[in-house]
Image: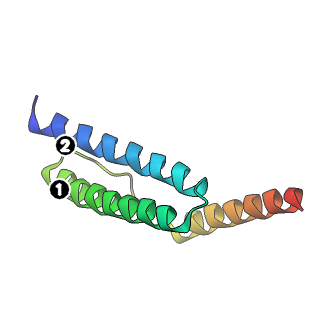
């Protein structure tokens, strides 16, 4: 297996574990256990970002162009509106 494939595989695994931690955290009632999972997720997020930076520098991972301020604002407003609608249906 080539270095590029190993790095991209590790990135994919790290992203999957971060998603799994998020699901577990939202379902965890015990605060000590919840905090432990949050710390593990935070560690995996740092690892994933550090590995991503290495992959990007080596040309293994090509990112999309940065969003414009308008695009960012539009997405943020859309997500905020969607969240508020969800909260409204729960009341």
Quadrant the C terminus occupies: bottom right
Res. 40 image quadrant = bottom left
x and y, in percent, of residue 81 in the image: 76, 63
Horizontal arrangement in the rendering, residue 20 relative to residue 64 (left or right): right
Estimate how packed mark 1 is, as few (under 14), some (14 to 19) or many (20 or more) residues with alpha carbons within 10 Å: some
Residue closest to the far left: 2
Q: Earlier in the sequence, mark 2 or mark 1?
A: 2
x and y, in percent, of residue 62 in the image: 28, 48
Give the labeled residue for mark 2.
Answer: 7
Front-lying residue, 45 or 21: 21
Residue 60 in view of the camera: yes
**Residue at image x 13%, y 51%?**
58
Residue 67 in view of the camera: no
Q: Label 2 vs label 1: CA separation? A: 9 Å
Give the labeled residue for mark 1.
Answer: 54
Quadrant the N terminus occupies: top left
x and y, in percent, of residue 10 in the image: 24, 42
Estimate how packed mark 2 is, as few (under 14), some (14 to 19) or many (20 or more) residues with alpha carbons within 10 Å: some
Which numbered tag is attached to residue 82? none
Secondary structure at numbered mark 2: helix
Res. 42 image quadrant = bottom left
**Residue at image x 29%, y 60%?**
49
From this view, report whether residue 77 is shown above or below residue 54.
Answer: below
**Residue at image x 46%, y 52%?**
21
From this view, report whether residue 18 is shown above or below residue 32.
Answer: above
Residue closest to the far top: 1
**Residue at image x 80%, y 57%?**
86
Secondary structure at numbered mark 1: helix
Tag 2–tag 1 contact (CB < 8 Å): yes
Colour convention of the picture: rainbow
Horizontal arrangement in the rendering, residue 16 relative to residue 82 (left or right): left
x and y, in percent, of residue 52 in the image: 26, 54
């Amino acid at each position: 297996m080539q270095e590029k494939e190993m790095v991209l595989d590790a990135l994919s695994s790290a992203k999957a574990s971060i998603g799994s931690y998020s699901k577990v955290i939202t379902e965890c009632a015990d605060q000590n256990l919840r905090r432990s999972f949050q710390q593990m997720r935070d560690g995996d997020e740092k690892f994933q970002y550090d590995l991503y930076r290495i992959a990007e520098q080596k040309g293994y991972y090509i990112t999309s162009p940065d969003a414009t301020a308008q695009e960012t604002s539009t997405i943020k407003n859309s997500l905020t509106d969607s969240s508020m609608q969800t909260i409204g249906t729960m009341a």
